[in-house]
Amino acid sequence: MRFKNTSLRKDFTISCRGKLLSLAEPQVMGIINVTDDSFYADSRSRELHDAVIRAEDLLAAGAAILDIGAQSSRPGAPEVGAAEETARLIPAIHAILYKFPEAVISVDTWHASVAEKCILAGAAIVNDISAGEMDPEMIPAVAALRAPYIAMHMQGTPATMQKSPQYEDVVQEVLDYFIQKTEACRAAGIHDIILDPGFGFGKTLAHNYQLLRGMEMLHIVGAPILAGVSRKSMVYKLLGTSAAEALNGTTVLHTAALERGASILRVHDVKEALEAVRIVSFMESA
């Protein structure tokens, strides 16, 4: 079953270590956190054995990409530093690829040096929550690595982003940011750019929903969009619950993001996200 070729969702492909990954149908990225303090406890896989089991579960459920991070980006989380990030990530990448050599791995880091080492270790994609703002060497490094680049919008830094974020028009400002950022990435030589609106990163609850409602505007940039809303506070704070109870609300937001043309869903729960993809796919093609 295929999505209609609409103006919102184009037949994007990204090159992952020479393997073309089609985004003509939305793909699901499963989250692996080799940390002790990520906001959703069930995504934590600090021990190497746990990371491999987590990868196996995500791939068996249908994840097309595994996104591995070693630095919590929740508001106010302490920074572990590039050396510790590398020490956590490289063994996890090696272990996962040893067991699943065809796995497509994305590395979640804002450090250029970490990105370089992880791509050389076998990762395929760089996922940078700062879009190069926290390390000016990141964009040139990704260009030299010839890797796809996920550039996320964030107002401030993880330490400051939720201290009274302000926008005149959050959709327009994020769009303007991405127009400038994609121009800079393409000028540097990055060919595969993916845009992440940065839900929960320097946005109030209202900003998050305004941005989701207007997300289709971001297609003006001409790049695939990644939606990262899984179990975030925009779900559980609105509903008065917790991250552990946010799966149902997450599925609602995944559906809304797919209807607005998201090409990738970054998720904790792959099976449920793929069910949303299948339902929206059928609805659009029926």
Image (tube, grey):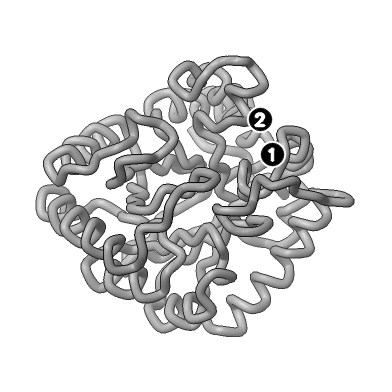
User: Is the residue under label 2 in contact with that under label 1 (CB below 8 Å)?
Assistant: yes
Q: Residue at x 41, y 57 (%)?
A: 79
Q: Amino acid at mark 2?
A: Ala
Q: Amino acid at mark 1?
A: Arg
Q: Nearer the viewer, residue 226 or 20?
A: 226
Judging by the rendered image, the residue that carries numbered circle 1 is 260
Tell me if 152 is positioned left or right of 50 in this view: right
Residue 242 lies, with reference to residue 141, above or below; the image says: above
User: Residue reaching furthest right?
Assistant: 168
Per the image, label 1 sits on a secondary structure element best described as loop
Judging by the rendered image, the residue that carries numbered circle 2 is 256
Q: How far is disc 1 from disc 2 in space, using C-alphas?
A: 6 Å
Tell me if 238 is positioned left or right of 95 in this view: right
In this rendering, the count of numbered labels is: 2
Measuring from the top left, give residue 19's x and y in whole percent.
32, 63
Q: Residue at x 62, y 53 (%)?
A: 160
Q: Nearer the viewer, residue 100 or 209?
A: 209
Q: Residue at x 36, y 45 (%)?
A: 64
Per the image, label 2 sits on a secondary structure element best described as helix
Q: Residues within 10 Å of mark 2 (few under 14, many from 20)?
A: some
Q: Residues within 10 Å of mark 1 (few under 14, many from 20)?
A: many
Give residue 280's quadrant in the image.
top right
Measuring from the top left, give residue 5's x and y in whole percent.
64, 46
